[in-house]
Amino acid sequence: MTFDVETAYTKLRSQFGERVRRNEPLARHGTFGVGGPADVWVSLDTQEALIGLVTICAECCWPLLITGNGTNVLYADEGVRGVVARIALNSYTIQDFADGTALLMVGAGASWPRLLNELAPLGWGGLEFGPGIPGTLGGGVISNAGVHGHDLGQVLEWVDVVDARQSEENRVAPTIVRYQHADLNLDYRHSRFRAQRRVQFDQQGYPLTALRKLIEPSEIIMQLGVRLYREDPQKLRMAIDEHKLYRKRTQPSQRSAGSVFKNPPGDSAGRLIEAAGLKGMIHGGAQISERHANFIVNVGGATAADVAALIKEARSRVYTQFGVELELEVELRGSWKVPET
């Protein structure tokens, strides 16, 4: 079935109201500040809305891309065809076990910094290492987000996902599945969900988007169960402030999507890129940060193509000089065109 923008917009508008918009600039929804329009944009703030949208798109064969805060996404200059939906599920409950621990049940769209500001005064610890992680908790699961020897996997108990994988008959019947910690394959910047998203590169070294599925991702993180513990609120506040200060001191202030590449075993991607002589390199409106070489920043008027060109240059130069093949942390989304050579 062909995707007709007007038909999709009309149907979704009747169901989700003003949360649906046409030709929404994705530059507004990614921390790089680049990207063209989404044909149809929807913001989802309840589990029912998420399941409903996935069901409609599956039944109508409309391409659907699910996203979060866009903190590690590079949207194409041509935008994204079909429906793009932001997970804004941010409500939570705390189950206190009265033994000094609790279970936080929280929507995948919850902002890590905002959640910390609410949990710390209540004396609940467990996530205080992450005030500098700008994304959602759901996004944190995908890459097992962490810093300074701590990561989300250390406190994550389970996740609920909407399973929208296609059957052998290419049909999608969304179901809710709970994955326990042992099922998530959590490791350094890795989870079972990350394994499906690894970016490949063409022969010229440009990053390529994976073949798009009808529903992408096909396993949509909806809710998390996180283990908390009792801690002195003042001690938590001090830890949070220390992590914020470290981030401010070591990371660039311009718009970026965080670390561009994973650190290779026993080394640092930033050190390798800097050693290759690329720190401060500019392409159009994008720059390899002068503060930290594993960040690409928008210094004004950058395009997605500018960022991709710097990704290509950094990865190719590091491989040529040091024989290290850097793995991309940033995800590419949308209608990408390979530059002409």
Image (spheres, grey):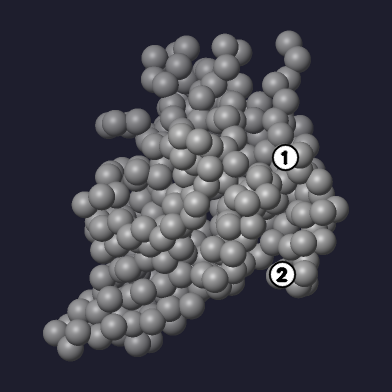
Horizontal and vertical percent for residue 43?
A: 66, 65
SS of the residue under disc 2: helix
Drawn side of residue 88 relative to residue 243, left or right: right
> Label 1, on which residue?
1
- Dot in front, 1 or 2: 1
Q: Looking at the picture, does residue 106 appear above or below residue 184?
A: below
Horizontal and vertical percent for residue 169?
A: 50, 36
| Marking on residue 304 | none
> Label 2, on which residue?
15
Horizontal and vertical percent for residue 215?
A: 57, 46
Between 214 and 211, which is closer to the camera in this rendering? 214
Residue at image x 57%, y 38%? 213
Check the image and name the residue furthest to the front. Answer: 169
Residue at image x 27%, y 45%? 185
Drawn side of residue 29 relative to residue 268, left or right: right
In the rendered image, the quadrant that contains the C terminus is top right
Horizontal and vertical percent for residue 81?
A: 74, 42
Between 140 and 80, which is closer to the camera in this rendering? 80
